[in-house]
Amino acid sequence: MEYTILLSILVLGVTAFISAVVLYLVSRKFAIPEEEKVSQIEEVLPQANCGGCGKAGCHDFAITCAHADAKTFSKLHCPVGGNEVMKKVAKILGFKPTVKEATVSVLRCNGTCQNAPAKIQYDGIFSCRVANKVSCGQTGCPTGCLRLGDCVKVCQFGALSIDKKTGIPVIDEDKCTSCGACVRTCPRQLFEIRNKSPKGNMVYVACRNTQKGAIARKNCKAACIACLKCNKINPDIKVENNLSYIPNTVSADDYGQELAQSCPTGAIIFTHCGDKKHD
Amino acid sequence: MFKISTAPHFQTTDDTRHIMQDVIIALMPAAFTAILFFGLNALLVILTSVAGCVLFEYLACRYWLKTSNTTTDLSAVVTGLLLAYNLPSSMPLWMTLVGCFVSIIIAKACYGGLGKNIFNPALVGRVFLFISFPVQMTTWPKPELGNIFELDAQTGATTLGILKHLDGSTSATSLQGDLPEYWEMFFGNIGGCLGEVSALALLLGVIYLIWKKVITWHIPFYYVATVFLITSIMWLITGKQSYDPITHILSGGLLLGAFFMATDYTTSPMNKKGQIIFAVGCGVLTVIIRLWSAYPEGVSFAILIMNAFVPLIDKYVTPRLYGSRR
Amino acid sequence: MTKLKTFPLGGIHPDKYKITTDSPIIDAGLPEIVYIPVKQHIGSPAKILVSKGDKVKVGTLLADADGIVSADVHSSVSGEVIKVESIEGEFGYLEDMITIKVEGDDFEPSIDRSTDINREIELSKEEIIAKIREAGIVGMGGAGYPTPVKTSIPENKKVDTLILNGIECEPFLTADDRLMVEKAEQIVIGAKIINKILGIQNAIIAIDENKPHAIETLSKITKTYVGVNVQVCATKYPQGGEKQLITAITGREVPSRKLPIDVGCIVQNVGTVFAVYEAVMKNKPLFERIVTLSGDACLHPANYRVRVGTPASFLIDKSGGITEKVSKVIFGGPMMGTAAFNINAPITKITSGILLLSEELSHKTEPQDCIRCGKCVEACPMGLQPYLIGRNVRNEKFSELAACHVLDCIECGCCAYTCPVHLPLLDYCKIAKSELKKK
């Protein structure tokens, strides 16, 4: 009896020992050599793996950073971590951090249920991609928001939600990391990553409709009709194809209020320090 | 206001509820024969089982899965019926409820509800009971035609139990009784679980299902044919009565399993080729368990084992693509 | 009775609703204004030749084919061009259209308006192709592929069979059915014309068994024409699909991403063949077609001969108008057609029907979880596994889609039709296709 117990202990013990040795050797043999810097950088990265930086994920970004020189590094930016994280990364690598302006995603459509009432009922799968193919949408505007929330589904940070009153998505500026997932998803390219002004203001044209003013207005009260009023306030604002576009260089602090007030249809939206309001 | 949507603008009027209704209708002849042969006890077991399954399904949807109430699609009723059909009529009712719990909560809700379970819920419940309460699960009241109110019926053996003993060297007749005639097995005048005794009732049910296009003939046919083929080969080679193919087909849960359990949508492969492989696998395993294992009956185990292979079959057995033939 | 021919894989039997089988073709008459889109076909839009204020006659060339894969567009009415600009089409998107105000009904003098049947094919192969091109003929079954391109056989390919598609497997539609009954001999002559282009002797007119009148009429006529035969097929959807029809008739299968021509077949819709006859024998460009106006919410279903560019609402008004019951207006058939956003959109060369469907018939039921019934796999005529495609799309596993052969999908809608839990399987397939094409 005792002999049996001893034998089993022995056999198991020897097996365990041999396995341990084998495991150790194998792990040494097949270990992936990893640079210390890469793992250090990875630790400070947000690990959202959103692809907002343009790389395949946080690990990929860390590798790129570790291999970058001072010049190429200044072009790298993690939109999710922002300046905070980039400062830490720069410290690890010994580079000078470049400070980027704060950015946020904006919806360039103000086709709310009130501005653009539904003319037809969409009865199908809740996917903007599909609806975009079937028709111009409920409102009749061929470039407007389809209100089916593909963007809400792809937002990893919960920054997007459909406002039940207006029907269109609203962006929570505090949560938005400008990773660009919504920009890539929207079948009508309605999202844009825009810089915030130093005071945290933004001004942009919330319309992408290139139809003639009269036709566009038939479907949506808040359509841009290319009246050129904004162009008169600041000539940098270009009006092409019946549509105005305010470039990032136009300061929202200086012109924002005036531009929004001058717009006869309300297509220009001026937001101030996070209190974003549609309509 | 008009509506717009993607094509097709036209859909079948079929839905899960209709399908389950058809299955329930198909199961009714077997319920009738069960009550005819095993009396009110059978009815009690069936009602308890159905009520238990519906109750657990409701509770699971309401308090756990937080999905919409899926009891209205009647799938729980089907599970309840099938579980009851796999129990002897003398089954204590509280044990039946335990079976319902295992079927619905463990075998179905744990996986996420209808359509996501890997194993046939009713069979999981049955096997659980079979292993937990072997005595109660193998006490087979003798069928007594028309004696509905007799609650203390005599017990006897199932056909397969007798076959198993025939195989052994001990004299079977003294302990177990004689093998029933074919016609007795066909009409259901044999010992066994509630729903499995009458081949005729099950056959009527499956013909209804095939006619209503709820299932295709593939799985039932290939399952039964495989069992028939292997047992007849064994029978011809050895000449032993225990390998009699017709007895094998008519006895035990084979027909119930082949017609109603193996054909369960969720736990069977998606395409014809896969279904045939699945059915043949079930058949082979059933025969192996029946002839060479300690258990007299192997249908439940065979189907459950093949259920586990379904994801694999679905992955590697794909339908023939149009254009692959030249 | 021998077994009728059909394709072997998948298919469904939707309720037919062929309520207008016995209604003769009625001339729809002239609307006040027509909108003629310059793109009624696959390929590049035609180049506009007219401008505002121009007077046109029936058959006047309005826009010229731009490139090989394109088609001429002709005026379908006489009158004055009042607008040449983008107008809301059936989807609500803007399309380039020529708007013509109708004044009288003058035809171009070159068009032979007599009703006699010309039986002698005197032109050479090249002349015939030129005529078809000038007439702007495109595939009228729904795809709108320019016919001259389809009938020009590349040097290295060989064609042995011409199949005339008279299947019309979509529920409700009867335009081809009526055309075969009323213009049977013209269709047969048309088939001989295309045969001459292809340099072959045989043509098979495929008709499914639920069109007894067409089968009877055409069988009688084909007796006097050598090489043209009627083949009756079993009724099954989507038998009218090009690939399915070829398999049904010849048993050959068109390999993935190959064309029918690669297996020696050319399939032409009977409507197209009739247009070829008119173009070659009567010098008549394609400016009118047969349209079925039907649907369970339609008061007076009928088959109309309609000028291209007629607003759908003109036809709808003729058939009793929009009633309370109408919930969807469909251009085309209920299985593959599109629900219209704008019912003033014009009927084009490829519109085979306008359907007014009620809420009961056309509503989409809320989808539930897949119960793995396998009905979609059984119904798919291409041997795909729609449930798997749907699952991958829902879980955003786009990398696994390539292995599902989604690009072979013909978008017939059998999977979505047959699904008992009403999953939008066809939509998933479309998403999958667009995702795959992105890469």
Image (cartoon, rainbow, N blue to C red):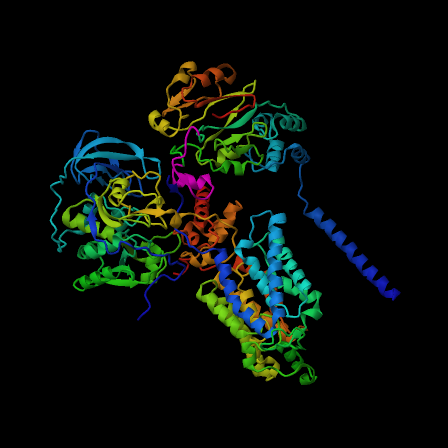
Q: Residue at x 45, y 52 (%)?
A: C405
Q: Image check: C289 left or right of C326? A: left
Asked if residue B9 shows in the view, the reply is no
User: Between residues B150 and C47, which one lies in front from this camera angle?
Assistant: B150
| Total marks placed | 0
- Residue farthest to the front? B149
Instruction: Provide the major secondary structure of the magenta segment.
Output: loop
Q: Is residue A184 above or below residue B163?
A: above
Residue C344 image offset from top left, x and y in percent: 29, 38
User: Between residues C160 and C421, which one lies in front from this camera angle?
Assistant: C421
Q: Is residue A218 above or below residue C346?
A: above
Q: Residue at x 53, y 30 (%)?
A: A171
Residue B165 image offset from top left, x and y in percent: 67, 80
Magenta stretch containing residue B69, yes or no? no
Q: Image check: B264 left or right of B91? A: left
Residue C31 image offset from top left, x and y in percent: 21, 39
Q: Quadrant of residue A80?
A: top right
Residue C162 image offset from top left, x and y in percent: 26, 57
User: Between residues C12 and B188, which one lies in front from this camera angle?
Assistant: B188
Q: Residue at x 61, y 55 (%)?
A: B55
Q: Quadrant of residue B187?
A: bottom right
Q: Quadrant of residue A119?
A: top left
Asked if residue A165 shows in the view, the reply is yes
Q: Residue at x 63, y 23 (%)?
A: A96
Magenta stretch containing residue A123, yes or no? yes
Residue stretch rendered in magenta on the structure: A114-137
